[in-house]
Image (cartoon, rainbow, N blue to C red):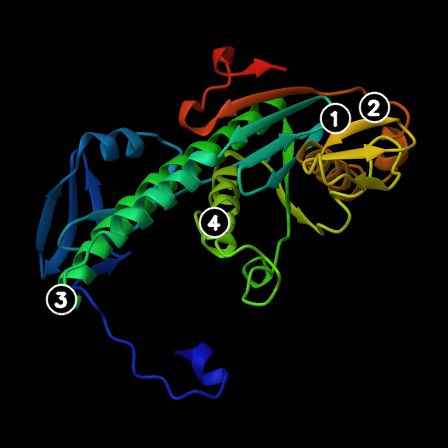
Amino acid sequence: MKRDIKKGRNPKSPFVQKPCLVSCYGFKINGMLLSFPVRNREFANILLNDHLIRILSDQSITPRSFTITPQSLSISIAKDVEPIQTESTIGVDRNLRNITFGNGKEIIQVNTSEMLKIKENYSHVKSTCTRNDHRIRKKVYGKLGKRQADRIRQRIHRMSKSIVNYAKKNKTAIIFEDLKGIRKLYRKGNGQEINSEEKLNSWSFYELERQTSYKAAWDGVPFYKIDPRCTSTLCPACRGRLQVDRQRRRDLWCGSCRRWRDRDVVAAMNIACKGLHRFCNPQGDAVEAMRGNLEEPAILRVDVSKLVTDWSDECIVQVL
């Protein structure tokens, strides 16, 4: 409402769409029960499940507030985290069909083409609903849309947790591109394909950034964002301009190094290099240190459906 008023609009007064209870005063966790006051010297008790009991048993976690709805109970928790002393950085490059993260030593590519198939399948199922009743169609579309969002959100959770665990294990800072205006690139009259906008909306680029940021903060892993300018057009070894070939759309040619480089790998390496220069090594020039001494990184590829969050199990990746 405040945002609409600043823009000169006349919004309606906000209202609660569903009954809920939010409180941060007077409640206690008594073993397996959540107790909160309802009247003078009278408390209500709610039995907690095993998941909440296991998390709240950690002595470093402090409950701050709770939210009760007719279907759920949410408890907000907090803990003191000591930042990890990082030794290097990893860059994360987001694309429509893969997520690439790593640095000059190792690159991991996660195939996300399955998310596009999920979007296409649910769009086809929705198109088969031909009932001439908007109430039934709205109910069916809402049910299918929730299933689609849950399946995509589950895969994004896997990717974000894997990125944070990898950074925590290798003591590296996570660097993202500060992307803005992605949705405006695919509009009517821009010369793009007919279904480009539908493919782009198959999953949220910002959702991966949001989940990675709060999971990194919870584990004490530094998280930064940089300007995405020239991250996919400069060679990470010699800083020369890369050339595009129409026949090899995802590969770029470096005239100085005389070799082809994968576009996504180049972007991840450049993002990591810029983040190292700006946030982790303010005294020296990371670009000059990287130039001429860059070894070809090992590229590890894995499908998002087979992704696990424990990087000690290396059977999920294949060195190419």
Q: Eyeballing the image, is 205 above or below 130?
A: above
Q: Where residue 294 is drawn, which disc sits there?
A: 2
| Residue type (three-letter) at the residue carrying disc 3 | Asp
Sequence-earlier tag: 3 or 1: 1
Q: Is residue 181 left or right of residue 288?
A: left
Question: Residue reaching furthest front?
Answer: 247
Q: Which quarter of the rendering shows the C terminus?
A: top right
- Give the percent coordinates (x, y) of residue 277: 80, 40
Sequence-earlier tag: 2 or 1: 1
Identify the residue at image location x=53%, y=32%.
Answer: 164
Q: Is residue 245 left or right of residue 82?
A: right
- The alpha-carbon separation of the residues under discs 4 and 3 comes to 28 Å
Q: Find disc 3 in the rendering and name its residue.
A: 133
Mark 1 against mark 4, which lies toward the viewer?
A: 4
Sequence-earlier tag: 2 or 4: 4
Q: Characterize the local packing of mark 3: few (<14), some (14-19) or many (20 or more) Cα atoms within 10 angstroms.
A: few
Q: Where residue 104 is drawn, which disc sits there?
A: 1
**Contact flag, marks 2 and 1 (Cβ < 8 Å):** yes
Q: Is residue 152 left or right of residue 319?
A: left
Sequence-earlier tag: 1 or 4: 1
**Contact flag, marks 4 and 3 (Cβ < 8 Å):** no
Which corner quadrant of the image does residue 247 belong to? top right
- Give the percent coordinates (x, y) of residue 156: 43, 38
Q: Find disc 4 in the rendering and name its residue.
A: 199
| Residue type (three-letter) at the residue carrying disc 2 | Leu
Question: Can the viewer see residue 119 in this picture?
Answer: yes
Mark 2 against mark 4, which lies toward the viewer?
A: 4
